[in-house]
């Protein structure tokens, strides 16, 4: 079993590895061996599942505005939202290299998809006007 060979393997809890490989060892031995090789269990980063087209569009946008001055950025109004959804809130754990080398490796990311139900909080902020009042609504 190569723990980094697939998305599923990276998500295999270390406590299950001895039974999968039919080894008679404990979790401490597994943890020590992985740490010695530079691996750790980390919570999978949650990112939108971006298409290749959207990745290119974001890169082009960043390149287009990379030379903007602080004053130009100061005039931009930014908006963002966050969702709260009902139900079970669990984190997905993955095995990856210690540090940032594999933090955003495709096998170490938990894709986020559009939510069917929940509550959204939305607001804006700008350098010129600061924070604005937020909005709250429930998604049907």
Image: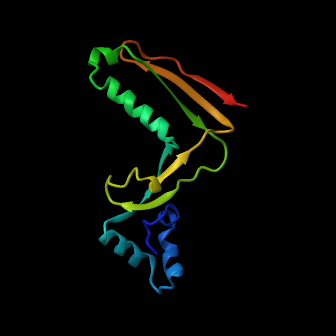
Q: Position of residue 46 (x, y in %)?
A: 49, 46
Q: Position of residue 37 (x, y in %)?
A: 31, 70
Where residue 42 sits, quadrant-wise, is bottom left
Colour scheme of this structure image?
Answer: rainbow
Q: Position of residue 12 (x, y in %)?
A: 51, 67
Q: Quadrant of the C terminus?
A: top right
Left or right of 136, for residue 125: left
Where residue 128 sits, quadrant-wise, is top left
Figure check: 113 above or below 3 = above
Figure check: 129 above or below 40 = above
Figure check: 117 above or below 97 = above
Front residue of 82/95: it is 95
Q: Position of residue 101 (x, y in %)?
A: 32, 54
Front residue of 82/47: it is 47
Name the residue at 48% across, 37% down: 53
Name the residue at 33% across, 18% down: 73
Front residue of 19/57: it is 57
Left or right of 26, for residue 122: right
Left or right of 125, for residue 83: right
């Amino acid at each position: 079993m190569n723990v980094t060979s697939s998305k599923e393997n990276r998500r295999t809890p270390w406590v299950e590895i001895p039974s999968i490989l039919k080894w008679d060892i404990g979790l401490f031995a597994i943890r020590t061996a992985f740490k010695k090789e530079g691996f750790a269990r980390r919570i999978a980063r949650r990112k939108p599942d971006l298409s290749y087209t959207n990745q290119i569009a974001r890169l082009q946008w960043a390149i287009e505005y990379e030379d903007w001055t602080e004053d130009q950025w100061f005039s931009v109004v930014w908006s963002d939202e966050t969702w709260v959804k009902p139900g079970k809130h669990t984190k997905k754990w993955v095995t990856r290299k210690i540090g940032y080398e594999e933090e955003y490796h495709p096998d170490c990311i938990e894709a986020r998809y559009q939510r069917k139900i929940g509550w959204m909080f939305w607001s804006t902020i700008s350098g010129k006007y600061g924070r604005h009042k937020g909005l709250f609504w429930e998604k049907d």
